Image: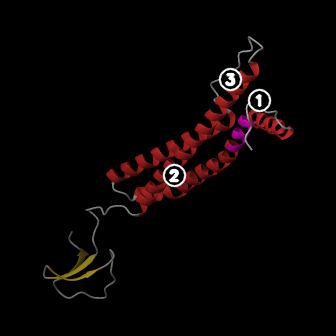
Amino acid sequence: MSLQPGAPASRDDHEAAALLDANERALLDTQRARAKNWLGILSAITALVAATLTLKGPDAAGDLPVGYRIWVTGVLIAGLVFLAWSTFLAYQAAYGDPSKIAAVDRGKLPGLAQRLLDAQRSLADTSANDLRGALFLLCLGALLVGSGTVMTWFPPRDGSAPTGTCISVDGKVIARLPGDSVTVGELTAGATIAPCPK
């Protein structure tokens, strides 16, 4: 149904206009409620990641070569910083910027309703942008922390680590065994058991 200029508005049109006005006034509250829901999810993921690192981190990190350990630590710290920043943005989206107090100039009564509506719309837009930023940083932080954790599972081979156990006779390797130890009952003269050469 299209309205012609000057055509009288129906009762449904007035009700629709009132509903839109009410929705517009509630926009900030609606956006902040959404952000509060996401805040719980963000906090849970950040806590889960921190707990995982606390339980797994020290054991796995001690076995890594020093240069690789520094790299993994940097990746994990960057991920945790992004997760903390994400949580801050989510709180800001839910409760507003803690360093600012929003105020509307009440100087002149004419236009006050529009100024208030514009201020609420601006705060709702800022809240939506903060929530989008929080979700992006959550994904980035989780990706970095996950990558850092996986890096501890598959570290590069340290060149100084033995590559197995070798049995040699008169200096010539005759058998390569996996692992770093072997149980032997008796060795013949000239036979040795040692870590395999690199």
SS at badge 3: loop
Q: Which residue is mark 2?
A: 142
* Image coordinates for residue 125, horizontal then vertical, percent: 63, 34
Q: Residue at x 41, y 58 (%)?
A: 151
Name the amino acid, label 3: Ala
As drawn, the label of residue 6 is 1
Cα separation, mark 2 vs mark 1, equals 57 Å
Tell me where the magenta segment starts and ends, as one range: 26-34
Cα separation, mark 3 vs mark 2, equals 33 Å
SS at badge 1: loop
Q: Nearer the viewer, residue 86 or 122?
A: 122
* Image coordinates for residue 194, horizontal then vertical, percent: 24, 75
Of labels 2 and 1, the one closer to you: 1
* Image coordinates for residue 28, horizontal then vertical, percent: 71, 35
Asked whether the residues under the numbered discs 3 and 2 touch, taking CB atoms below 8 Å apart as contact, a structural biologist would say no
Of labels 3 and 2, the one closer to you: 3
Say whether residue 33 is magenta: yes
Compared across the picture, whether 136 is left or right of 147 comes to right
Q: Earlier in the sequence, mark 1 or mark 3?
A: 1
Cα separation, mark 1 vs mark 3, equals 39 Å
Name the amino acid, label 2: Ala
Q: Residue at x 51, y 43 (%)?
A: 82
Q: Quadrant of residue 89?
A: top right
Image position of 192 with respect to 85: above or below: below
Image position of 198 with respect to 123: above or below: below
Say whether residue 185 is magenta: no
Label 1 crowd bin: few (<14), some (14–19), many (20+), radius 10 Å: few
